[in-house]
């Protein structure tokens, strides 16, 4: 932000900062792997009253993946985003988005999770509209409307939960919620969380904002959106339903039905599209379904499969949207019918593109 007018300096700072973030994330992951869960109490306010940050193996892994994807997209942004857009504060806002993602993965307080979600929404809304093209504005309206609605539902769920338990610390809630007698109100809170995070994760039938908006911003923005933004919703669902609402069997059935319908609707949507970016957008929805299915099964091995798939999907989706940007740079279009001769003219590049597509 101190180099607002100096685009070249911003590019260098972004990439150097990206390397530092990868190094620090690696150190955090190494520490968690060897020494167990790490916690920090912000401003020394003790839990459950203060804001707690927690790094376990899952959150440390996702922070590491965020920093790796962030570094890759920093490089890609430097080369692919046009200078006019960079001059409107692209890099500062992009790093605010990464800040929000990292905070969401590390928070141990459910209200603080909402705060990080808001930072993510504000940053992503600026990035999706940067350039002010008609398609972008249209996509942004759909994106913002649905996500604000999800935030309101999420906040209502937090209010109900706080009214029931008198605490918002996740570890504290895990011990209080199973002992509450008013199970119906607990179920209401659980459904509110499912709907709120379901919109953010783009599950059936709450997914239609995603393919309507993810194809509109620059490829670099779509890469970080496709790789990480929907996964924050999935991560939140994992945290909430594996920690707080563990014993509500009826939710498992709902999650499994939603998962199957999400897989089908994503797959069918991708089959009928002609725009490469829209195909990838529907594939995000399809693959979110696989993760929700793991959550619905609720067994240890299903959770392991879901987390493994989540890690894989972040890397692949980030790559695919960058590939779509490369294709657009070469051919000037993302229409599948007009993309012949790529292998004939760019064989090495095509083989590299083949790797994430096979993945």
Image (spheres, helix red, strand yellow):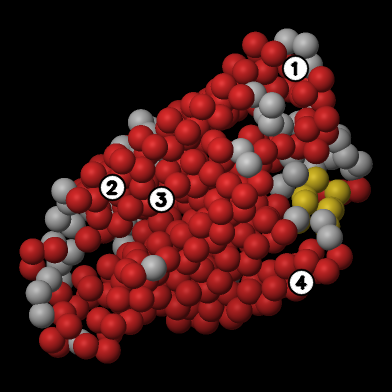
How far apart marks 3 and 2 lie (CA) works out to 9 Å
How far apart marks 2 and 4 lie (CA) works out to 37 Å
Residue 329 in the image, given as x and y percentages of width and height: 22, 75
Q: Please, what secondary structure does the residue beneath circle 1 have?
A: helix
**In the foreground, 99 or 230:** 230
Is residue 153 at all visible to an observer of this figure?
yes
Question: In the rendered structure, are the residues bearing label 2 and label 4 in contact, judged by CB atoms less than 8 Å apart?
Answer: no
Left of 203 or right of it: where is 231? right
Q: Residue at x 45, y 78 (%)?
A: 75
The quarter in which the N terminus is drawn is bottom right
Q: Earlier in the sequence, mark 1 or mark 2?
A: 1
Left of 336 or right of it: where is 73? right
How far apart marks 4 and 3 lie (CA) works out to 29 Å
Q: Which mark is residue 322?
A: none
232 in relation to 188, above or below = below
348 in relation to 277, above or below = below
Q: Which residue is mark 4?
A: 30
Q: Which residue is mark 2?
A: 267
Q: Which mark is residue 287?
A: 3
Question: In the rendered structure, are the residues bearing label 3 and label 1 in contact, judged by CB atoms less than 8 Å apart?
Answer: no
2 vs 4, front mark: 2
């Amino acid at each position: 932000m101190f180099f607002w007018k100096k685009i070249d300096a911003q590019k260098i700072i972004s990439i150097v900062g990206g390397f530092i973030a990868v190094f620090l994330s690696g150190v955090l992951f190494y520490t968690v792997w060897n020494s167990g869960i790490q916690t920090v109490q912000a401003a020394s306010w003790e839990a459950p009253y203060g804001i707690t940050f927690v790094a376990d193996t899952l959150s440390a892994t996702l922070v590491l993946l965020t920093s790796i994807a962030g570094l890759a997209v920093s490089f890609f942004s430097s080369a692919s985003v046009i200078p006019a857009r960079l001059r409107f504060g692209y890099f500062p806002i992009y790093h605010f988005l990464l800040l929000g993602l990292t905070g969401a993965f590390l928070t141990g307080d459910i209200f603080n999770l909402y705060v990080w979600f808001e930072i993510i929404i504000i940053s992503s809304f600026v990035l999706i509209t940067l350039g002010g093209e008609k398609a972008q504005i249209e996509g942004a309206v759909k994106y913002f409307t649905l996500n604000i609605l999800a935030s309101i539902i999420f906040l209502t769920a937090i209010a109900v939960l706080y009214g029931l338990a008198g605490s918002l610390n996740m570890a504290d809630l895990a011990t209080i919620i199973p002992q509450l007698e008013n199970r119906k109100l607990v179920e209401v809170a659980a459904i509110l969380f499912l709907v709120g995070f379901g919109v953010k994760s783009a599950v059936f039938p709450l997914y239609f904002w995603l393919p309507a908006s993810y194809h509109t911003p620059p490829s670099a923005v779509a890469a970080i959106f496709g790789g990480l933004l929907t996964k924050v919703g999935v991560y939140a669902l994992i945290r909430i339903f594996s920690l707080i609402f563990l014993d509500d069997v009826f939710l498992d059935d709902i999650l499994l039905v939603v998962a199957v319908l999400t897989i089908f609707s994503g797959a069918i949507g991708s089959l009928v599209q002609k725009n490469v970016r829209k195909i990838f957008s529907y594939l995000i929805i399809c693959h979110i379904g696989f993760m929700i299915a793991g959550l619905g099964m609720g067994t240890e091995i299903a959770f392991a499969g879901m987390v493994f798939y989540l890690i894989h999907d972040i890397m692949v989706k980030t790559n695919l949207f960058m590939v779509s940007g490369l294709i657009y740079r070469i051919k000037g279009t993302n229409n599948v019918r007009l993309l012949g001769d790529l292998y004939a003219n760019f064989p090495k590049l095509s083989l590299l593109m083949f790797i994430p597509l096979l993945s």
